[in-house]
Amino acid sequence: MKFNIALLAGDGIGPEVINEAVKVSDAIAKKFNHEINWTPALTGACAIDAVGVPYPDETHEICMKADAVLFGAIGHPKYDNDPSAKVRPEQGLLLMRKKLGLFANVRPTFTFPSLIDNSPLKRERIEGTDLVFLRELTGGIYFGEKGRKDNGDTAFDNCVYTRAEVQRLAKKGFELAMTRSKKLCCVDKANVLETSRLWRETVQAMEKDYPEVEVSYEFVDAVAMRLVQWPNSYDVLITENLFGDILTDEASVISGSMGLMPSASVGEHTSLYEPIHGSYPQATGLNIANPLATILSAAMMFEDAFGLKAEADAIRAVVNKSLAEGIVTEDLAPKGAKAYKTSEVGDWLVANL
Amino acid sequence: MKFNIALLAGDGIGPEVINEAVKVSDAIAKKFNHEINWTPALTGACAIDAVGVPYPDETHEICMKADAVLFGAIGHPKYDNDPSAKVRPEQGLLLMRKKLGLFANVRPTFTFPSLIDNSPLKRERIEGTDLVFLRELTGGIYFGEKGRKDNGDTAFDNCVYTRAEVQRLAKKGFELAMTRSKKLCCVDKANVLETSRLWRETVQAMEKDYPEVEVSYEFVDAVAMRLVQWPNSYDVLITENLFGDILTDEASVISGSMGLMPSASVGEHTSLYEPIHGSYPQATGLNIANPLATILSAAMMFEDAFGLKAEADAIRAVVNKSLAEGIVTEDLAPKGAKAYKTSEVGDWLVANL
Ligand SMILES: CC(C)[C@H](C(=O)O)[C@@H](O)C(=O)O
Ligand SMILES: CC(C)[C@H](C(=O)O)[C@@H](O)C(=O)O
């Protein structure tokens, strides 16, 4: 098969981790007789520096034409301390999500047996955790009307959801639950918010179409607690944009393997794969960043965007092997053990595929 | 001194834990020569059952006349499964907060040395944790305009904040920080929300009035992570209503002592003290619920509402003694050890004051 992949490396360590994901993807493609055509494009702070906007039209065109997008990370400290600045890298992220119609953010949290002791949680609490959040990504309070009144003394943000938006996200949730343990948790704040009541009634009405799926409804505050107490009691969780932002980040640290967690954002026009970690500016250019989350995001891309499960499994297998053999960057190297460079980890994976 | 305290026991185990807090408060009053006049009033499901509304006018009158309110817990399963029901106990809670002007919810999270191993977190992560959230409680998306359009297919919730609302909450935060380690964290989502940008700019403008306080600004998703990773890195945190709902609950489970955490809600007309746990309906009438969170809430009341620190410290000291000597309810009793009844714990505390 032949694929066109848009390559958005972004800022900070983005280019370094993306580089390793490209190496591994190319090696897999070669092994399984595929051909990948990578098209690099600018986004984030580097795009602001180059052309003045964080998500240039040219980048959008490249993404729209691609079969999938592989994304690194964006953000630079020079834009950090002033969230009200006119142009910021995150605006590019939101614009990209909206323009590409990436309405569902898929965020798995799972554990690696060899890394379980990195978790801030006790072993018995985290062991066996394997959950997936589906976060709605193009609606809610992120994209509602916002502004000021009363000479700037009153601010407002409107949260809006339509039944159709909830349905398309929930459909993905039910479908995903069917491929897993058939447990779906709808996370909302239906005791306070009207949008949450719409979420809940919409999901309730869909239950009959998936009689095998056991659906539960939990308030967002209760989920924030149970994620710390018994994360292994969850399977698939669906939720709106802002709750998803908070809870997926909370979930990502409980595994103790945040540097390894991949993600996907799927939608109308294409799908995008990215590590959940940030651009880690302090490490830029040092060749020390952990590339595994990006490489595992590429594995998600092979499986979900191209339907190539064997290829994805081959990537995951070699990643597991590298972990088991201690071929890891400094964030994962035990005290006193050798820490490998970003590029050395990639080289080892390619050699051992 | 003489005090009038409104006593809102509520539902489920509310009356049982309130009963022990009254016993301990009366014993303290006697010891220190005060006189407490308790006025019971209905709220929650029991108020709906009795008079059709969850926060009756009569209850409101009693609270307004009182020097402080001691609150148990509300909620009953018969109202749980239908968040869109016309009358629900939580509506009473929101109405009460609004009508009493309880704009600041004070939620400490701290550890008890003898209970540290109950935490889902590893000891080295949780040890030394002693933080306080100040959650704005009468504004934001909880109280903004909400409703439906398009024949019910579109739902909206409006989040609104005024500069004055932020200032009065932040003022409490700065003042509290001055009595502690002088570290204040403003939690917002200023990279996305206009209300958060108003929060941030308002707090920034107040920094000059508290030159000794070191202020940091963190995004809500980052705080959701760091609370699990390094809770002991926080001191005082201020945040808006919905973020506070999620984060204070997350914080409450990390200590492993949720059944012991007190809280206060302070405001324009009076102040209210309550345990953070719920009404625990399954345990109703069994005399097994842990009364310590309510008793420690009464201690907060003595100190903060009446300025009686010695009285508050006496309550805390005897609670610590009961923990150290294992006079605890079943939730805290180690396997095989004797579990005391709710009323037995109260009796022991009174006897050992
Ligand atoms: C950078 C920010 C706008 C973004 C979000 O809130 O969606 C980030 O936190 C994320 O989760 O991808
Ligand atoms: C019951 C509910 C309305 C309430 C809230 O969201 O404020 C509760 O979760 C709380 O935190 O006191």
Image (tube, coloured by chain):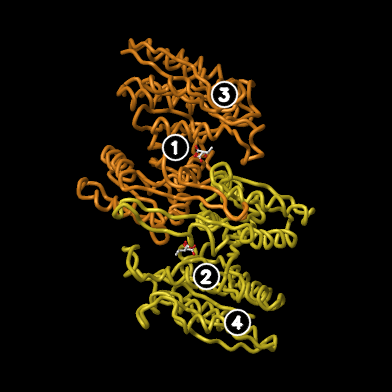
Chain colours: A orange, B yellow
Q: Which of B115/B264 is in front?
A: B264
In the rendered image, which quarter contains the N terminus of chain B?
A: bottom right
Q: Which residue is mark 1?
A: A111
Q: Which of A84/B318 is in front?
A: A84
How far is disc 3 from disc 4 in space, using C-alphas? 64 Å
Percent coordinates x, y for residue A330 in the rendering: 60, 27
Give the residue type at disc 4.
Answer: Ser
- The answer to whether marks 4 and 2 sit on the same chain is yes
Q: Which residue is mark 2?
A: B97
In the rendered image, which quarter contains the C terminus of chain B?
A: bottom right
Above or below A42: residue A243: below
Give the residue type at disc 3.
Answer: Ala
How far is disc 2 from disc 1 in space, using C-alphas? 42 Å
Badge 4 marks a residue whose secondary structure is helix
Give the residue type at disc 2.
Answer: Arg
Q: Residues within 10 Å of mark 4 (few under 14, many from 20)?
A: many
* Pointer 2 chain: B
Does residue B235 appear in this view?
yes
Q: Are marks 4 and 2 in contact (CB under 8 Å)?
A: no
Q: Which residue is mark 4?
A: B25
Give the residue type at disc 1.
Answer: Thr
Does residue B248 appear in this view?
no
* Pointer 1 chain: A
- The answer to whether marks 4 and 1 sit on the same chain is no
Q: Which of A314/B339 is in front?
A: A314
How far is disc 3 from disc 1 in space, using C-alphas? 35 Å
Question: Residue A172 falls in which quadrant of the image?
Answer: top left
- The answer to whether the beta carbon of the residue marked 2 is less than 8 Å from any atom of ligand 2 is yes
Q: Which residue is mark 3?
A: A47
Badge 2 marks a residue whose secondary structure is helix
Question: Residue B29 falls in which quadrant of the image?
Answer: bottom right
